[in-house]
Image: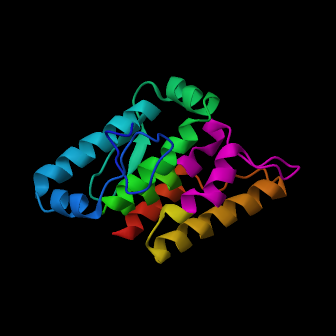
């Protein structure tokens, strides 16, 4: 994980060296080839989750044609995967692909019921919802992106706490949001 998704921050693995700013600059100046490699690495992560990238330009995601249910179960049952989300988001930001982070989180929010990541009627947040509020939102360097994510998250939290039967933040909402970004 550390080798495919290096970041400037010191991660959980003390023997992994943080990426240096000059290394990022050097890599980004290598042109489209490096961008293709970065996208390939990102797609490895998505495949692990049973998700596929539909558009590299917008970051639009969908469930993979097969394996989503099995991958979802694995992700839900192994909470250490939530740490990986932080790393991937930071990595995408390091390499000027933060729009993929926005799309990724909003996709996960649209799929939150499949992952069992809802707020209980007692107000208890799932580990994902807790991580979203405490960590993931702050991985965005761009304040406008952070505000958009926060707005969607607050809408979902309010909805989930209201015990409303209708759905909130669906795949259709997600796709509309992504299509309006670029």
In the image, 18 versus 98, the foreground residue is 18
In the image, 49 versus 82, the foreground residue is 82
Q: Hey, which residue is sitting farthest bottom in the picture?
A: 144
The image shows residue 87 at horizontal and vertical percentages of: 45, 48
The image shows residue 147 at horizontal and vertical percentages of: 55, 73
Residue 96 lies in what quarter of the image? bottom left
Figure quadrant of the N terminus: top left
The image shows residue 35 at horizontal and vertical percentages of: 19, 53
Q: Is residue 15 above or below residue 89?
A: above
Q: Hey, which residue is sitting farthest right in the picture?
A: 122
In the image, 102 versus 155, the foreground residue is 102
Residue occupying image coordinates x 83% and y 52%:
163
Decide if residue 144 is on the left or right side of residue 80.
left
Residue 126 lies in what quarter of the image? top right
Residue 24 lies in what quarter of the image? bottom left
Residue occupying image coordinates x 38% and y 38%:
45
Segment colored magenta: 108-137
């Amino acid at each position: 994980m550390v080798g495919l998704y290096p970041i400037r921050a010191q991660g959980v693995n003390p023997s992994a060296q943080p990426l240096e700013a000059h290394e990022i600059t050097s890599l980004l100046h290598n042109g489209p080839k490096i961008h293709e490699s970065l996208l390939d690495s990102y797609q490895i992560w998505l495949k692990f989750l049973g998700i596929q990238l539909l558009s590299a330009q917008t970051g639009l995601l969908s469930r993979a044609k097969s394996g989503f249910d099995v991958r979802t179960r694995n992700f839900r049952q192994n909470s250490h995967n939530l740490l990986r989300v932080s790393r991937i988001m930071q990595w995408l930001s390091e390499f000027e692909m933060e729009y993929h982070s926005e799309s990724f989180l909003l996709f996960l929010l649209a799929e939150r019921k499949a992952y069992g990541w809802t707020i209980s009627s007692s107000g208890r947040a799932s580990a994902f919802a807790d991580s979203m509020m405490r960590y993931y939102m702050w991985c965005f360097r761009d304040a406008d992106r952070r505000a958009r994510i926060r707005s969607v998250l607050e809408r979902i939290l309010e909805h989930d706490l209201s015990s409303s039967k209708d759905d909130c933040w669906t795949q259709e909402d997600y796709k509309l949001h992504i299509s309006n970004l670029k």
